[in-house]
Image (spheres, rainbow, N blue to C red):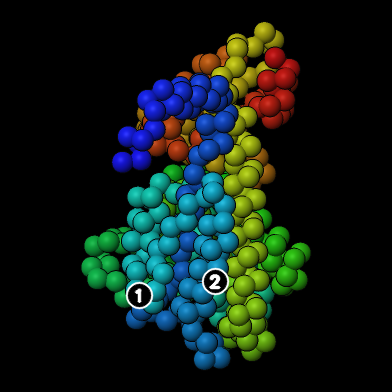
Amino acid sequence: MILKSIPKYLLFCTSTLTLFFLLLATPNDLIAQKKYVIVVDAGHGGKDPGNLGNGYKEKDIALKVAKIVGAELSKRSDIKVVYTRKTDVFIDLWKRGDIANEAKADVFVSIHCDSHTSKAFGAGTFVLGLRGNKKNLEIAKRENAVVFMEENYRDRYKGFDPNSAESMIGLSLMQEENLDQSLEIASLVQLNFVKRLKRRDRKVKQDNFQVLRETIMPSVLVELGFLTNKKEGRYLNSKLGQKQMGKAIADALKKYVDNLKLNTVSDTVVEESPKTNNVIFKIQIASGRTKIDEKPYNFKGLKNVERVKIDKFYKYYYGHSKDYKTVEKNLKKAKSKGYRSAFIVAIKDGKKISVKEARKLL
């Protein structure tokens, strides 16, 4: 009814104007409009209460903090929040990862509370990795033990024993390919805990958490603190504590998204071919502590993969080229093979520089 009352020439002008602005929009503008999907996972739930230090329920605190994180993130128009659970229900570990994978999430964050027989306290953040020290292994075992509550867990997790050190070690390179991004997120979260909230720093650590193994995007697991510590348990069970911890996590995720947007815009702009011989572009497809032979069968058929060791980590590069258009095609190919987190890097005279700087040099 409303449309009929509007003169046709006005509708035509409006449509033409809209098309005009769309044509004016640059690729960077369109990239900047992307919705970044963040999956917020409240640990435990339903028949699985988590740890019950000092009578507090981990599942309840995790859910309340998760909702605060989601509410804070939802204030941003460029972020879409997906919850693995919004009520007190039991969700299988594999299902939590499945939710994130189906949502094509950019980030997965799982929220928990820790426990210990001592008076231990402090906040820590974990990323997926090879088995760490004995203390980290015990934390991973506790969080992974929930698989025994799931139906058909023997079939679902065939070959994986939450209490086996051997199972903790058996990670492939594909399970670590998002390590760089996961470490960045974890570091931002931990920085907010320590600098802003003055929580005791239990550092960013790596271990084999089953819920992180199920995801195919950068993922972190947050241990808010120890419910078994009376003072810390009381803080985490309070509205103030939950609000502060939730906001600290959300702000870290916002910062990561901002960094991601800058990197995405600078790394996906089509450039003309380089005119100099000392700048080379590569695709970083994976990184991790695992040393893998650079054979095509280890990299989904990709040939001429280069392995470089930096500190304790191995980085794997594909598609070396002096031509930016060529390396963009290589990036698309790597992503089509399943390396969704692959990105372009620039090397000048043997040293890594930003792609933005490389473009300026060219």
Left/right placement of residue 361 relative to residue 131 reads right
Q: Residue at x 35, y 55 (%)?
A: 98
Judged from this view, the residue extending furthest toward the bottom is: 55
Q: Which residue is drawn at 41% across and 69% down?
A: 86
Marks 1/2: CA–CA distance = 16 Å
Q: Earlier in the sequence, mark 1 or mark 2?
A: 2
Q: Can residue 176 be seen in this view?
A: no
Q: Which residue is drawn at 60% across and 68% down?
A: 246
Quadrant of residue 1 within the rendered picture: top left
Q: Residue 89 carries which label?
A: 1
Q: Residues within 10 Å of mark 1 (few under 14, many from 20)?
A: some
User: Residue under circle 2?
Assistant: 65
Where 8 sits versus 210, above or below?
above
Give the residue type that dot 2 points to. Val
Q: What element carries label 2?
A: helix
Residue situated in front as seen by the camera: 348 or 45 = 45
Left/right placement of residue 273 relative to residue 90 reads right
Q: How crowded is mark 2: few (under 14 residues within 10 Å), some or many (20 or more)?
A: many
| Residue 362 picture location, percent across and down | 70, 14
Residue situated in front as seen by the camera: 57 or 93 = 57
| Residue 342 picture location, percent across and down | 51, 35
Give the residue type that dot 1 points to. Val
Left/right placement of residue 1 relative to residue 180 reads left
Q: Is residue 260 visible?
A: yes
Q: Is mark 1 on a helix, strand or loop?
A: loop
